[in-house]
Every structure is written in C-alpha cells, then in structure tokens.
Image: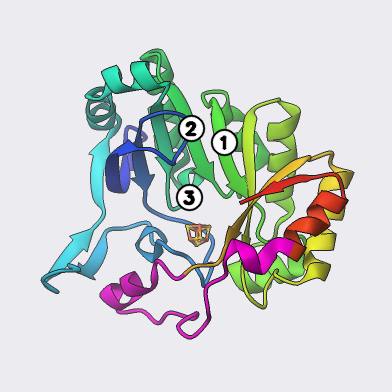
C-alpha cells in the first residue's frame, strides 16, 4: 500500500480525554499485540473486517482506506477549537506503528499545519522508527503491560524489550510522556507485581505512572465480531481495589495516580 494511504476504523471529533484541549482522534487499524483484555478488538486486524452493527445487528464492515490528505482535511475542520483549547490531533489505534509510513506522514503534515500532535502507542517497534516518528509528536501516551518479558510475551504475543527501550528514549528526549499500566487481574495486579514495576521505574528514573484498572467496556464488541472474550466472568477493578498497589509506587518515590 502506498505511504499516503492507510486503513483507519474511526475518526472522533471533540475528544476531551486523548490529550490536551479539544482534539480530533484518528484511529488506525492493526496491532501486533493480542492483549486478551483489549477494549478495541476491532482495532487488532489490519484489514477491514465484518462486524455486526450494535443497534440493528446488521452485518457491516469496520475499517476503510483513507489518504493522508483526506485525514488532514477532516482534522483541520476543527482548527478553531484547537486554537481556543490548546488541542489538536491525536493518532491512536490499534497500534499506529503498524502503519508506520502512513502514521508518520499524517503527523508530519499536521506539524506543517501548525497542529499540536499526540500519539497513543504500545511503543512496540524498532527504535529507529520510534525515534523517527516522535520527531513530529508533542505528547505521548504509552504503557507497560508487564515488567517480565516472558510473561509479557505469553499474554500479549510479544516481548517487552523494544517497548522499554522506546519508553526510556521518549523520557530521555524530554517528550511529554504519560506512562500507564493497565492493571489486569491475575496478570500484573499483585503487590509483588507492583514492586517489580516500581523497581524497574526506579532503575530508569521514571517518576510518574498512571494506573488503568481493568474494565470490560469492550466486551460487547467481541460478540459483534463473532469472537470469544477471555475476560467474560472477570470482575472489573476500581481505584479503591488498588490503593495498596498504588502505595507500593508511592513508597518507591513514584507519583502514582488513576
Ligand atoms: S496493544 Fe492495545 S490495541 Fe493492541 S491488542 Fe493490546 S490493548 Fe488492543
């Protein structure tokens, strides 16, 4: 596929939680990870795929090809709101690096238009590409799902080495980074897990982390895609379930918040 076009599965205007100010969030399709708790399972496969409409249950297709020009034109419709609120463009997924050239071209064009740019990424990509793309990025949301690379691979399908290396690079470049841990039952939610995460962050002088307690918001989408949801009977977590977990990070001098 040419680098000026790619597959997206949504464009969301007036997003308030995907970075500073009012934003337009563009969701790219395709992710090399397979987290069984994924709240956006329709984002995982790169190509458009059949899905049932939530209301009518009629079959439709999720994912469509768009050019960089089309996306920038769409994003620029709300430029007045960005200027008033300090907002801009957010590129999310899936995993944006799964369509590296497409993602980079969108961000490069956005910067040429003077837009503030945010990405949401797993940081699972070769470091050269990570460094190349974040040149066009002001703000980064990323996460670390497990501190142990074997456990990380067992559950997500990939090791964590590249992810950790790229996260360290983003901090070293003094980018604005929000680092998160999705706290998942029986995967990384014990106090021992918290201690290992905290020790790793201490080692890399990472002083802030956001906890994302497990939820089941994506469950219905698995049904609409005709896939099985692995967390069907698993209770959601809430901040009050994780105060001791949070305290472990505080005890290691890390600002830990929800
Ligand atoms: S990295 Fe994100 S998008 Fe990819 S499978 Fe995991 S939760 Fe889903």
Rounded to the nearest angstrom, the CA distance separating label 3 from label 2 is 13 Å
First in sequence: mark 3 or mark 1?
Answer: 3
State the residue in front, 205 or 84: 84
For mark 1, what is the residue?
140
State the residue in front, 75 or 131: 75
Label 3 or label 1, whichever lies nearer to me, is: 1
User: In the image, which disc is placed on residue 118?
Assistant: 2
Q: Residues within 10 Å of mark 3 (few under 14, many from 20)?
A: many
Q: In the image, is residue 50 above or below residue 113? A: below
Proximity of marks 3 and 2: CB atoms separated by less than 8 Å:
no
The residue lying at 23 percent from left, 50 percent from top is: 64
Magenta stretch, residue numbers: 216-243
| Residue 123 in sight | no
Coordinates of residue 171 in the picture (x, y in percent) = 72, 33
Label 3 or label 2, whichever lies nearer to me, is: 2
Q: Is mark 3 within 8 Å of ligand 1?
A: yes
Q: In the image, is residue 31 above or below residue 237? A: above
For mark 3, what is the residue?
95
């Amino acid at each position: 596929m040419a680098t000026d076009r790619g597959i997206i599965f949504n464009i969301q205007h007036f997003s308030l939680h995907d970075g500073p100010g009012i934003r337009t969030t563009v969701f790219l399709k395709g992710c090399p990870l397979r987290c069984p708790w994924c709240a956006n399972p329709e984002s995982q496969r790169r190509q458009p795929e059949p899905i049932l409409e939530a209301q009518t249950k009629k079959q439709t297709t999720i994912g469509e090809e768009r050019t960089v020009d089309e996306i920038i034109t769409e994003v620029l419709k709300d430029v007045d709101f960005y200027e008033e609120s300090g907002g801009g463009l957010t590129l999310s997924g899936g995993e944006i690096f799964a369509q590296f050239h497409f993602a980079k071209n969108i961000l490069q064009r956005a910067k040429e238009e003077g837009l503030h740019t945010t990405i949401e990424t797993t940081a699972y990509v070769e470091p050269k590409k990570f460094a190349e793309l974040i040149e066009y990025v002001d703000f980064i949301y990323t996460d670390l799902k497990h501190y142990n690379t074997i456990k990380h691979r067992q559950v997500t399908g990939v090791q964590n080495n590249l992810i950790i290396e790229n996260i360290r690079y983003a901090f070293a470049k003094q980018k604005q980074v929000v680092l998160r841990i999705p706290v998942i039952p029986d995967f990384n939610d014990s106090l021992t897990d918290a201690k290992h995460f905290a020790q790793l962050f201490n080692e890399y002088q990472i002083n802030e982390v956001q906890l994302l307690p497990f939820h089941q918001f994506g469950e219905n989408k698995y049904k609409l895609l005709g896939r099985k949801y692995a967390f069907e009977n698993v209770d959601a977590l809430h901040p009050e379930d994780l105060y001791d977990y949070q305290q472990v990070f505080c005890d290691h001098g890390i600002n830990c918040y929800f």
